[in-house]
Image: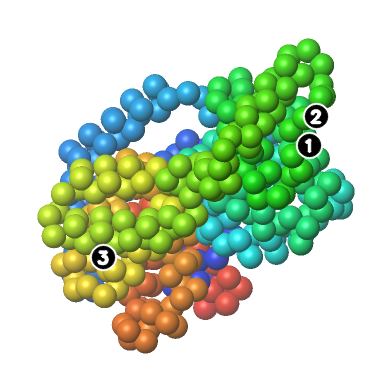
């Protein structure tokens, strides 16, 4: 039996989870140097100096940054997976369906999910925090009862002392989530007047509730709280897409890798990087070989420097595969070009090879 080769089949959700696991072990999946270009091939050698410079800058930033809260991982943390997938896709209806499908009883699962959603959102940027607020509003009374949403917020208040060890601004962020939940009619205003806990936990909880109460007591609090997470609000998803398209087109015009990296970083929306990969691939499908090689050159630098992760790349590929029929209407060769990109991504070690299916194994026999 010969060894099976990477398949051009759909890069599945299972493969994405495998990528995500490997990306968290400390291996950044550095691209190998060199490579070859040719007709219909994505990629060229080069840019080693810039890769090293960006990598050094990223490591320096990580050393200076505060420690991010690491949540306890269970054998299968389905709450975390639902939140992670939601932050990647931004699909409210898909996330709501996933919450409905949680394996644990609703009385246990729903408050824990709200707590996990809030604590994970604190680790990210305004874009993800706005997504979290929008999801809570979407789940309210349709998927999760008001009482269980309130219980999830209370659980988060009760663990605030632990959260703030690793996320010093956790209390301020939770106050904003509480105020937004009141503005969205997800929590009753009287929730902010509750007294609970003992010792340090009580002091932190009461301070956070007091800050949230001040926010909702301010004049014209409704419109203000609709944008409480700043420029990362959900209405900016279209803006983010437009920004990404502009970054890619500007890069093709100038070839300035450092400027492209700086512009993407300035979006402050790490979870949107999977959509960046999706846009890069789709743009490449429409362009000629030279443009495709330039785009892969860009992705090689970003992957090596940790600007995009294996998780982002695999998810971007999956987004493209899901819309392949539409893409083929404009680019008849889209399917073969996408398969070529997957092969290139595996060869560059940006992502591991898709696990072989039963059909693949039979072909290899």
| 187 with respect to 36 (left or right) | right
What residue is shown at x 37% (from left), y 72% (from top)?
338
Give the number of the disc on residue 181: none
Q: CA distance from mark 3 to mark 2?
A: 59 Å
Give the number of the disc on residue 190: 1
The part of the image, by quadrant, that contains residue 341 is bottom left
**Nearer the viewer's eye, disc 1 or disc 2?**
1
Read off the residue under disc 3.
42
Question: Residue 82 or 296: which is nearer the viewer?
Answer: 82
Lower position in the chain sequence, tag 3 or tag 1: 3
| 6 with respect to 109 (left or right) | left
State whether residue 177 is above or below residue 290. Answer: above
Disc 3 on helix, strand or loop?
A: loop
Residue found farthest to the front: 219
Read off the residue under disc 2.
194
Answer yes or no: do the residues labelled 3 and 2 have beta carbons within 8 Å?
A: no
Question: Residue 261 or 363: which is nearer the viewer?
Answer: 261
Residue 244 coordinates in the image, percent (x, y): 32, 57
Disc 1 on helix, strand or loop?
A: helix
Lower position in the chain sequence, tag 3 or tag 2: 3
């Amino acid at each position: 039996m010969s060894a099976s080769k990477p398949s051009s089949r759909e890069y599945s959700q299972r493969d994405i989870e495998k990528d995500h696991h490997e990306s968290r072990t400390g291996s950044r999946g550095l691209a190998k140097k060199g490579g070859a270009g040719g007709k219909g091939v994505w990629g060229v050698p080069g840019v080693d100096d810039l890769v090293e410079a960006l990598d050094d800058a990223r490591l320096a930033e990580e050393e200076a940054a505060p420690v991010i809260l690491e949540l306890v991982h269970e054998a299968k943390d389905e709450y975390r997976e639902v939140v992670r997938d939601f932050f990647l896709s931004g699909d409210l209806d898909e996330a709501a369906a996933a919450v409905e499908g949680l394996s644990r009883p609703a009385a246990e699962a729903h408050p824990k999910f709200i707590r996990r959603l809030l604590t994970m959102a604190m680790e990210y940027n305004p874009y993800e925090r706005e997504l979290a607020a929008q999801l809570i509003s979407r789940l309210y009374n349709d998927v999760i009862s008001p009482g269980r949403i309130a219980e999830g917020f209370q659980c988060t208040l009760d663990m605030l002392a632990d959260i703030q060890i690793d996320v010093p601004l956790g209390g301020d962020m939770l106050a904003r989530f509480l105020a937004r939940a009141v503005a969205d009619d997800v929590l009753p205003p009287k929730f902010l007047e509750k007294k609970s806990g003992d010792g340090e936990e009580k002091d932190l909880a009461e301070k956070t509730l007091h800050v949230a109460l001040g926010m909702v007591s301010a004049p014209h609090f409704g419109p203000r709280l609709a944008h409480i997470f700043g420029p990362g609000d959900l209405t900016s998803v279209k803006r983010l897409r437009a920004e990404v398209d502009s970054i890619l087109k500007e890069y093709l015009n100038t070839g300035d890798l450092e400027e492209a990296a700086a512009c993407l970083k300035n979006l402050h929306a790490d979870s949107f990087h999977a959509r960046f990969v999706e846009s890069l691939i789709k743009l490449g499908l429409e362009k000629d070989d030279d443009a495709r090689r330039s785009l892969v050159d860009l992705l090689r630098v970003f992957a090596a420097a940790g600007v995009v992760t294996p998780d982002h790349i695999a998810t971007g590929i999956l987004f493209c595969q899901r819309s392949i029929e539409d893409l083929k209407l404009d680019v008849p060769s889209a399917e073969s070009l996408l398969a070529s990109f997957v092969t290139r991504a595996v060869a560059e070690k940006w992502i591991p090879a898709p696990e072989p299916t039963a059909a693949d194994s039979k072909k290899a026999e």
